[in-house]
Image: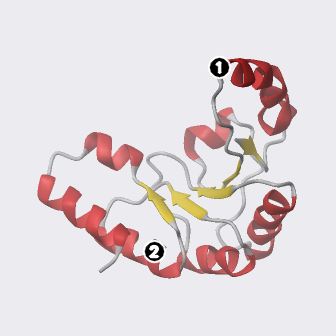
């Protein structure tokens, strides 16, 4: 995983260089992913020193995503950050999906069936609901969000 919009080269490429021989030795299949942090970004944006993609900056989101694909990434991940108060906007998901030929993952701030459905309908191939899944005590709501993320 490469945090495409980090201002710290460690998150863009140095960590991958540092661990590549261990990955090879362990026989782990590397699956490359361009990781793009969208505002609010939360802790991952802070720790990763992200130059956050503004929620209305479709051009920057598309440029980061397409650069990821051109660099040979197998996936692109738009991330609003764990526990974000707002998910990645559907307009951004749609714009990014419209220029990619690799799968698009979307996460951060998705904690309702409506948000999951909006991301799916906008073009997300996969939806991550990590914090919601960890903290949800309502199995009915959890099932609704999972069902909405998969579609009819």
Q: Is residue 39 above or below residue 90?
A: above
Label ID, residue 14: none
How packed mark 2 is, by other alpha carbons closer than 10 Å (few <14, some 14-19, many 20 or more), is many
- Report the residue marked by disc 1: 26
Q: Is residue 127 left or right of residue 28?
A: left
Task: Name the residue located 74 percent from the left edge and 44 percent from the top edge.
Answer: 3
Q: Viewer-proximal residue, 9 or 17?
A: 17
Task: Name the residue located 63 percent from the left edge and 29 percent from the top edge.
Answer: 28
How packed mark 1 is, by other alpha carbons closer than 10 Å (few <14, some 14-19, many 20 or more), is few
Figure coloring: secondary structure
Q: Is residue 85 above or below residue 134?
A: below
SS at mark 1? Answer: helix
Q: Is residue 98 above or below residue 75?
A: below
Quadrant containing the C terminus in the rendered view? bottom left
Q: Is residue 47 left or right of residue 117?
A: right
Task: Name the residue located 85 percent from the left edge and 61 percent from the top edge.
Answer: 67
Q: CA distance from mark 1 to mark 2?
A: 35 Å
Task: Name the residue located 75 percent from the left edge and 78 percent from the top edge.
Answer: 99
Residue 40 drawn at (x, y percent) = 59, 54
SS at mark 2? Answer: helix
Residue 17 drawn at (x, y percent) = 84, 27
Quadrant containing the N terminus in the rendered view? top right
- Report the residue marked by disc 2: 120
* Numbered disc in front, either 1 or 2: 1
């Amino acid at each position: 995983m490469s945090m495409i919009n980090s201002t710290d080269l460690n998150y863009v490429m140095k960590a991958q260089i540092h661990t590549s021989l261990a990955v090879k030795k362990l026989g782990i299949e590397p699956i490359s992913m361009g990781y793009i942090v969208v505002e609010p970004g939360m802790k991952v944006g802070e720790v990763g020193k992200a130059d956050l993609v503004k929620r209305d900056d479709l051009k920057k989101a598309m440029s980061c995503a397409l650069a990821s694909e051109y660099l040979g990434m197998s996936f692109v991940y738009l991330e609003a950050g764990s526990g974000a108060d707002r998910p990645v906007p559907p307009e951004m998901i749609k714009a990014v999906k419209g220029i990619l030929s690799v799968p698009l993952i979307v996460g951060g701030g998705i904690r309702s069936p409506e948000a999951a459905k909006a991301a799916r309908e906008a073009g997300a191939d996969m939806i991550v609901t990590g914090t919601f899944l960890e903290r949800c005590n309502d199995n009915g709501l959890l099932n609704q969000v999972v069902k909405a993320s998969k579609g009819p």
